[in-house]
Image: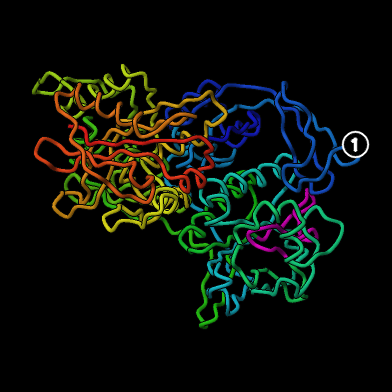
């Protein structure tokens, strides 16, 4: 998780009440923040984009700007600023509303009882319109969701400007998933005309000056040559047209999710700010917009928020942002049973107000709870139960023994796994643990196999490398061999682990079974080597090795065998790896593999 430095003086000012540092630390820790300690940060201001960089006392001076990537080789590009005393803490990924000094101050004011309850923000009616053009939700340019807001009367200084830029990047990391799901742009409103269009353009259709560059460039050139363009070009891969924000004068504000324009950047002289958030889905976009808007309003007292009118291609008009709180009903009896705490119906609303919510009775042992719009982490009433526990204090929850006592013992399957591990270790093999998730490419295509129909596919994979649950251990073990070719040969590796198969007869729809896999690689490895290991393993478990001929595309023909149990059922296999598979795995040494069901 990223570690940020929160200026102690600014945090104390925003609390609006004299609070000792140790009280702040205790409150943040009880809310789940991991405090790294205190420190002095050296600060440097980029003269190109105005971004403020921070370095600890032991870190080297920055060589380039983290925001616009300007080269600091010459002293004219960077300006030292006075150091600042900070509280260093690790970002809590599920609490993006606490990524900055304003959000932390808001959470602490509620938790410490300075101003408990729901924080509300007045939004002025819109004076600005954004038109979403046709073509933003079609193949080749699909990034249709957008939300916008205006903040007037912001009093920027170098530190506040740094907070806004850092908050943007941290939200890109947490909610935006490195800009894939949401990207944020902030602009000096005085540089923009009243009407803005969100529309697709051809790669070489127009030019604008990207942040940190002296020359204007086309969107296509920016993706090819600008450092930010090259870093995030993969987000627009496959796009034949690129999304741009352009005002009525034809001035480009930004090319989401890549980079803003130089002419509209926010500086310390900016007083009014225009914010946009774009992405594939409006839900994530709205959450991101609510967080950054309310945080800026928090650390810039006196500023006023303002809605923006969005006009879509179907003629619908939408006002953003929407700061209406989320409503949820909480069952206090269920909460008390789950948490094991004796919170009364009368005490519970006060505890939830310490976490920034508003709660009212809604019948016996039930609460109607209003959750602020800047808290995107609530999906179920269990999330409210966690808030109740935090406010009550985990240190006040005393451990108690369960009414019925039993003596723990290993699951029979784990006993078998331990037996197999002991045998294989005794045979001189080294145990490895590989990932349960993989991809169709690495698990099947690399071995000349189609994806089996009973493979467990992930509906919403986090990456292209983790799209399914493994059905055998061979891919992980052979990849381990491939990644360690620089190590001394031969390799003698094994793994005892679970594999998954779709099975409608199981309660979960997935059958989990335990298997043992052995991978051997080295200059003289052949079928005889893997057979000797498998025979010793089977013999040590009290059985005899019974084999039959086996033909598989990943084994050399005639040098593979299936393994049968005492009842004649197939329980495993072994063989010498085919040269084509070795080539795909970038292995130049012969290899052999064996796998068998545990039990």
**Residue drawn 64% across and 62% down?**
256
Magenta: main secondary structure equals loop
Circle 1: element type: helix
Residue 352 on image: x %, y %: 35, 40
230 w.r.t. 356: above or below: below
539 w.r.t. 508: above or below: above
Name which quarter of the figure residue 55 lies in: top right
Residue 444 on image: x %, y %: 39, 51
Name which quarter of the figure residue 340 lies in: top left
Q: Foreground residue, 100 or 71? A: 71
Q: Which residue does the numbered mark 1 point to in the structure image?
A: 75
Residue 364 on image: x %, y %: 16, 47
Residue 500 on image: x %, y %: 27, 45
**Residue drawn 14% across and 43% down?**
569
**Residue drawn 55% across and 40% down?**
99
Residue 63 belongs to the span the image colors magenta: no
Q: Residue lying furthest bottom in this view?
A: 315
The quadrant in which the C terminus is found is: top left
Q: Is residue 124 left or right of residue 259?
A: left
Q: Is residue 151 visible?
A: no
Q: Is residue 247 left or right of residue 463?
A: right
Residue 270 belongs to the span the image colors magenta: yes
Q: Foreground residue, 583 or 156? A: 583
**Residue drawn 38% across and 31% down?**
433
Judging from the image, the colouring scheme is rainbow
């Amino acid at each position: 998780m990223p570690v940020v430095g929160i200026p102690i003086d600014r945090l104390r000012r925003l609390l609006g009440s004299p609070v000792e540092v140790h009280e702040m630390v205790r409150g943040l820790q009880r809310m789940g923040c991991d405090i790294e300690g205190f420190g002095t940060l050296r600060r440097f201001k980029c003269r190109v984009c105005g971004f403020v960089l921070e370095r600890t006392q032991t870190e080297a001076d920055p060589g380039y700007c983290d925001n616009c990537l300007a080269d600091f080789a010459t002293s004219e590009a960077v300006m030292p600023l006075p150091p600042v005393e900070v509280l260093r803490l690790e970002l809590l990924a599920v609490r993006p509303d606490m990524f900055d000094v304003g959000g932390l101050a808001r959470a602490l004011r509620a938790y410490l009882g300075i101003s408990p309850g729901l924080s509300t923000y007045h939004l002025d009616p819109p004076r600005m319109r954004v038109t979403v053009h046709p073509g933003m939700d079609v193949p080749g340019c699909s990034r249709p969701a957008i939300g916008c807001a205006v903040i007037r009367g912001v009093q920027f200084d170098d530190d506040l400007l740094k907070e806004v830029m850092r908050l943007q990047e941290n939200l890109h990391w947490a909610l935006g998933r490195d800009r894939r799901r949401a990207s944020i742009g902030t602009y000096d409103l005085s540089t923009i005309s009243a009407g803005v269009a969100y529309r697709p353009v051809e790669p070489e259709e127009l030019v604008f000056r990207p942040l940190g560059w002296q020359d204007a460039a086309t969107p296509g050139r920016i993706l090819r040559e600008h450092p930010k363009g090259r870093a995030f070009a993969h987000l627009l891969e496959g796009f034949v047209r690129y999304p741009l924000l352009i005002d009525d004068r034809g001035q480009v504000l930004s090319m989401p999710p890549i980079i803003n324009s130089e002419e509209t950047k926010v500086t310390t002289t900016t007083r009014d700010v225009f914010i946009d958030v774009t992405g594939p889905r409006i839900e994530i976009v709205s959450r991101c917009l609510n967080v950054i808007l309310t945080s800026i309003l928090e650390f810039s007292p006196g500023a006023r928020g303002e809605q923006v009118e969005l006009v879509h291609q179907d003629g619908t008009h939408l006002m953003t942002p929407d700061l209406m709180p989320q409503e949820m009903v909480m069952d206090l009896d269920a909460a008390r049973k789950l948490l094991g705490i004796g919170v009364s119906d009368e005490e519970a609303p006060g505890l939830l107000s310490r976490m920034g919510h508003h709660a009212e009775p809604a019948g016996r042992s039930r609460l109607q709870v209003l959750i602020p719009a800047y808290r995107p982490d609530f999906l179920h009433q269990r999330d409210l139960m966690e808030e109740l526990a935090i406010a009550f204090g985990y240190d006040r929850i005393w451990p108690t023994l369960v009414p019925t006592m039993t003596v723990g013992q290993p699951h029979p399957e784990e006993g078998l796994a331990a037996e197999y591990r002991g045998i294989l270790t005794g045979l001189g093999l080294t145990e490895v643990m590989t990932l349960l998730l993989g991809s169709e490419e690495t698990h099947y295509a690399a071995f000349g196999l189609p994806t089996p129909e009973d493979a467990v596919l992930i509906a919403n994979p986090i990456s292209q490398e983790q799209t399914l649950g493994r059905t055998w251990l061979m891919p992980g073990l052979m990849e381990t061999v491939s990644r360690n070719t620089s190590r001394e040969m031969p390799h003698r590796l094994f793994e005892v682990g679970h594999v998954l198969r779709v099975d409608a007869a199981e309660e979960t729809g997935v059958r989990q079974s335990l298997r043992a896999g052995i991978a051997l690689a080295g200059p003289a490895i052949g079928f005889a080597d893997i057979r000797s290991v498998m025979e010793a393993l089977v013999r040590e478990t009290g059985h005899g090795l019974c084999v039959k001929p086996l033909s598989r595309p990943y084994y050399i023909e005639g040098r593979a065998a299936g393994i049968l149990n005492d009842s004649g059922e197939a329980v495993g296999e072994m063989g010498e790896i085919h040269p084509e598979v070795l080539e795909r795995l970038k292995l130049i040494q012969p290899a052999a593999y064996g796998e068998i069901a545990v039990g």
